[in-house]
Image (spheres, rainbow, N blue to C red):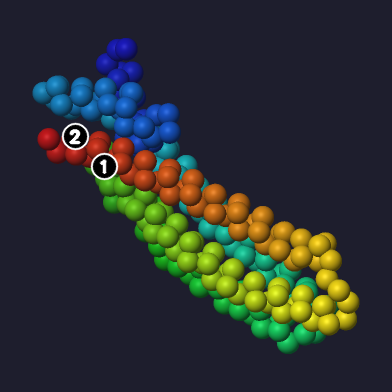
């Protein structure tokens, strides 16, 4: 690998946090060793760092948009149920979910604000931005656990109450229980797994980036 290729690889590792799932081994470890051994640190392709940073900014905006869309769909479904039944409990649950979604979106926007671009276009600034993005993302993931728990606490009593009213008119069947809890259980399981993966990804990326920054300070 010539000098230009080494510089480009170093720039890529800086923003990506390391190849192959952000493991601190492999190319990232070799590049850190190169940094320690060379008397003059390699230069960086700032344009490449800028492009990668913009892509991650687009990813943050897309995540916020997706969260808003999912929240709107969930609230819309509950409002449709409330409109169809006219039951006060259905309206209360729908309004409660709206309050949770608004609270969640406010927290996410506030947590991820200020992460759109580095303070300056230097390798150190891009690295600081990447580290801060990981830390803020972990904060969002921790909040998502609490949001998921509150959703379950809101929806399960509502489902049980509605099943109880149905049981007063006819015996409940297995299809009633599966229809009531199957969708909720599937969505909660998917969100649980997604949060586990998101936390694992952020922790590994933060570890790799922190190791890279520590190698700069040696």
Is residue 146 visible in the rendered image? The answer is: yes
Q: Do tag 1 and tag 2 residues touch (Cβ < 8 Å)?
A: no
User: Residue shown at 39%/54% (left/top)?
Assistant: 138
The quarter of the picture where the N terminus appears is top left
Q: Is residue 190 toward the left or the right of residue 129 in the image? A: right
Of 101 and 65, nearer the camera is 101
Residue under label 2: 215
Of 157 and 24, nearer the camera is 157
Work out whether 214 lies above or below 189.
above
User: Residue shown at 83%/71% (left/top)?
Assistant: 172
The numbered mark, 1 or 2, whose residue comes first in the sequence reads 1
Work out whether 207 lies above or below 94.
above
The quarter of the picture where the C terminus appears is top left
Residue under label 1: 210
Q: Residue 213: which quarter of the image?
A: top left
Mark 2 secondary-structure assignment: helix
């Amino acid at each position: 690998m010539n000098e230009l290729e080494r510089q480009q690889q170093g720039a890529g590792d800086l923003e990506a946090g390391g190849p192959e799932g952000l493991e601190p081994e492999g190319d990232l470890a070799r590049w850190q060793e190169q940094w320690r051994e060379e008397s003059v640190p390699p230069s960086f392709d700032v344009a490449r760092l800028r492009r990668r940073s913009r892509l991650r900014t687009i990813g943050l905006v897309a995540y916020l948009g997706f969260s808003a869309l999912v929240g709107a769909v969930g609230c819309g479904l509950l409002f449709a149920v409330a409109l169809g039944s006219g039951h006060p409990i259905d309206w209360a649950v729908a309004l409660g979910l709206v309050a949770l979604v608004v609270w969640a979106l406010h927290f996410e926007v506030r947590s991820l604000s200020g992460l759109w671009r580095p303070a300056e276009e230097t390798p150190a600034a891009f690295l600081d931005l990447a580290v801060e993005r990981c830390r803020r993302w972990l904060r969002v993931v921790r909040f998502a656990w609490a949001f998921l728990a509150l959703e379950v606490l809101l929806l399960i009593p509502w489902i049980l109450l509605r099943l109880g009213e149905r049981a007063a008119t006819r015996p409940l069947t297995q299809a009633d229980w599966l229809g009531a809890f199957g969708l909720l259980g599937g969505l909660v399981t998917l969100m649980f797994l997604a949060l586990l993966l998101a936390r694992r990804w952020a922790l590994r990326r933060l570890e790799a980036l922190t190791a890279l920054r520590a190698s700069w300070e040696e």
